[in-house]
Amino acid sequence: MSKFTRDHFQRVCLSNDPDIDPFDLVKCYVTHHAQQDDNKIVSEFFNGVTGKFLSIGANNGLDQTHELLVKGWTGVYCEPDPFACAKLIETTKNFKDQVTILNCAITPTGGVTEFFLALDNSFVSSLSLDWIDNHVKNATTQRIITHSLAFSQVLAMFDYDFDYIQTDTEGYDIQIIESLDWSLVPTCKMICTEAG
């Protein structure tokens, strides 16, 4: 898999036409679909297989990665929202030997960054206050400072050894995905990302 570009991402993932596939990426299960389909797609693709996942913007962990843990997978969760991270720790307590949880943001460059908590709905907390304002009317927010790691740093920490990677970063998925040379992750068989 080569380096993703913003053009690839926009033409495939952000298309309103579910049949568009100019780079034949649907065959690799990079596709435009509704969030409720994620569990089914991931479960069918990895049926009978165990591996390791990376979840960027994990929130509370109640998504398709939870089912992977039940099936014996190991995983790394990255979540900068301290309240959502506390829920994530609770959600994964029965899998404590299978997970690593990083309470930090993932960005293209790493460092220290602003993060905006959406106090009424942690699912829309973001690195971008504008993103929250565009998606939730009259959101109550709080600005915090958090650590961030570059996407490449997280991959290097875990030997670039992930079978499944998902991002759900409320407005920063494109920047994160295009920051990496995907040939460095030869074991990655599927990427699932938020497209809206």
Image (tube, rainbow, N blue to C red):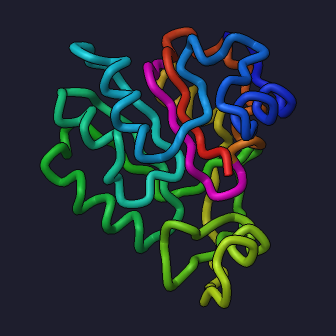
Label total for image: 0
Q: Is residue 196 left or right of residue 94?
A: right
Q: Quadrant of residue 59?
A: bottom left
Q: Main secondary structure of the magenta part?
A: loop
Furthest-left residue in view? Answer: 94
Residue 147 magenta:
no
Corner quadrant of residue 74: top left
The answer to whether 167 is drawn above or below residue 137 in the figure is above
75, 12: nearer the viewer: 12
Identify the residue at image location x=40%, y=28%: 41
Residue at 64 percent across and 58 percent down: it is 170
**Residue 134 location, x and y as percent?**
75, 73
- Is 180 positioned to the left or the right of 62 in the image? right
| Residue at 66% across, 10% down | 1
Magenta highlight range: 161-172
In terms of depth relative to the viewer, which is nearer, 5 or 145? 5
Is 165 one of the magenta-colored residues? Answer: yes
Q: Would residue 86 appear left or right of 24 to someone viewing this image?
A: left
Given residues 108 and 38, the one toward you in this image is 38
The image shows residue 120 at horizontal and vertical percentages of 50, 84
Q: Is residue 110 left or right of residue 70?
A: right
| Residue 33 placement (x, y as % from top left) | 55, 37
Q: What residue lies at 75% left-to-right and 13% top-to-bottom? A: 23
In the depicted structure, whether residue 10 falls above or below residue 46: below
Q: Position of residue 25 (x, y in %)?
A: 65, 16
